[in-house]
Image (spheres, rainbow, N blue to C red):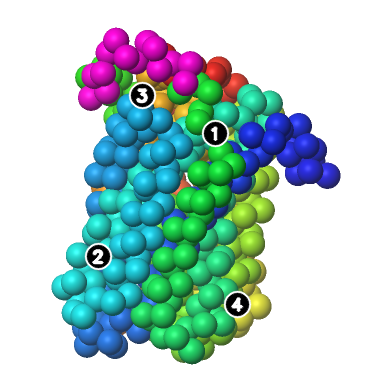
Amino acid sequence: MEFIGHFRRLTAVQRHTFIACFLGWSLDAFDFFILIFCVSALATQFQTKVSAVTEAIFLTLAMRPVGAFLFGLMADRFGRRPTLMVDIIAYSVFELGSAFAPSFKVFLIMRALFGIAMGGEWGVGAALAFETLPAEGRGFFSGLLQEGYVVGYLMAALVYGAMFPIVGWRGMFVIGALPAFLVIYIRTQVDESPAWLQGRVSRAADRGSGKDLWSHAGVFVFLVVLMFAFNSFSHGTQDLYPTFLEKNLQFTPKTVSFIAIVYNIGALLGGVFFGTWSERIGRRRAIVIAALLTIPVIPLWAYSHTVPMLALGGFLMQFMVQGAWGVIPAHLNELSPPAVRGTLPGFAYQIGNFFSSRNSVIQAKLAESRYGGSFPPVLAWTVVLVASLVAIVTSSGKERRGADLSNTG
């Protein structure tokens, strides 16, 4: 009922804008997670180790800051809406290019280019959404918007379970090019951010977005550290979990898909729950509670052997991980200075992501070299370390819950 109530209070323009930004982020994540589910198949196809294929994950994540900066500058200069359309077309094209890669080297190049486009979507979409939406219910919409990422993971799990045995990994990447059609919806149904339009006159006198970013270096550095912790948190619990289920427990694609669907439902619910709860208890407190509650879930999540227990452990783990994440879109936009809101949140997010981008490679190599290919110890220690880091960094920062996001001048 609360879900329906929040949407009923929106105007038609606000509703279309949120839906477009949500789908843009969901389909971006869908394209990324197709790679996660195809790691084993790619290793077989290109006759290499799993740890070598995870270099493709690293390249995607490492190139995201480039996209966040470039597309962020475009969004602050030319507007959120046209930049979002260009970005969606770009990541769809490079996803399609990945499907037809004739060699592993070409595949890696395609994933690096995809990473640039992927890096631009979150910051531009979040700025467009929160500059258009009302302040009331911002925590709820923050949680729901961020969990577009989880919806993308869920879609990838469904498509993997249903289509992979039929179309193989190349067919999966072809399906990943379909988000390009979202541009038609944005072109016909979405308006430019009113905050960007209002601030356009004042920005015309000063085009120095790079200088503006530098003048807020303190906020930027804090957000980078925070996003390093957060990206280590999510990628450390997501990226190699399907591989763990396949390699260590010998589960079939359908079983892996089922468990992934269950834990992504948990992630979606957690993001909305903690995002909404942050309106009452504060952004920082909601994040810290969610992060620390992942630690007691570790035994069930990493050391269970039956499908029901692993599904339950995955559900609870991602409920908390994405619960913490659900607060982030609102929190980062509230903390960011108006003149660089199109650039700073997304760029900080992706620089933090860059510093955590070798996480999956490190995890895979540790499992191979130190634990004889066993993933549970690596997964468990990852959660202990990064959950603690998320709680500590979040607690040390500020919050501006309910800040006015109606202008970018």
Marks 3 and 2 sit apart, C-alpha to C-alpha, by 30 Å
Q: Quadrant of the rendered structure where residue 139 is?
A: top right
Residue 393, compared with residue 120, is above or below; it is: above
Using the image as rendered, state which of residue 391 and residue 69 is in the foreground: 69
Callout in the foreground (2, 1): 1
Neighbor class of circle 4 (other Cα within 10 Å; few <14, some 14-19, many 20+) is: some
First in sequence: mark 4 or mark 1? Answer: 1
Direction from residue 121 to residue 256 in the image, left or right: right
Point out residue 329 in the picture as x, y percentages from the top left corner: 51, 37
| The C terminus - image quarter | top left
Using the image as rendered, state which of residue 298 and residue 100 is in the foreground: 100
Name the residue beneath numbered marker 4: 258
Callout 2 secondary element? helix
Point out residue 378 in the picture as x, y percentages from the top left corner: 36, 67
Callout 3 secondary element? helix
Name the residue beneath numbered marker 2: 110
Name the residue beneath numbered marker 3: 340
Point out residue 30 in the picture as x, y percentages from the top left corner: 47, 63
Amino acid on which disc 4 is placed: Phe
Does any portion of residue 350 appear in the rendered image? no
Dots 4, 1 in contact, CB < 8 A: no
Amino acid on which disc 3 is placed: Val
Using the image as rendered, state which of residue 387 and residue 232 is in the foreground: 232
Neighbor class of circle 2 (other Cα within 10 Å; few <14, some 14-19, many 20+) is: many
First in sequence: mark 3 or mark 2? Answer: 2
Using the image as rendered, state which of residue 193 and residue 250 is in the foreground: 193
Callout in the foreground (4, 2): 2
Marks 3 and 4 sit apart, C-alpha to C-alpha, by 41 Å
Name the residue beneath numbered marker 1: 191
Q: Which residues are magenta?
A: 197-210
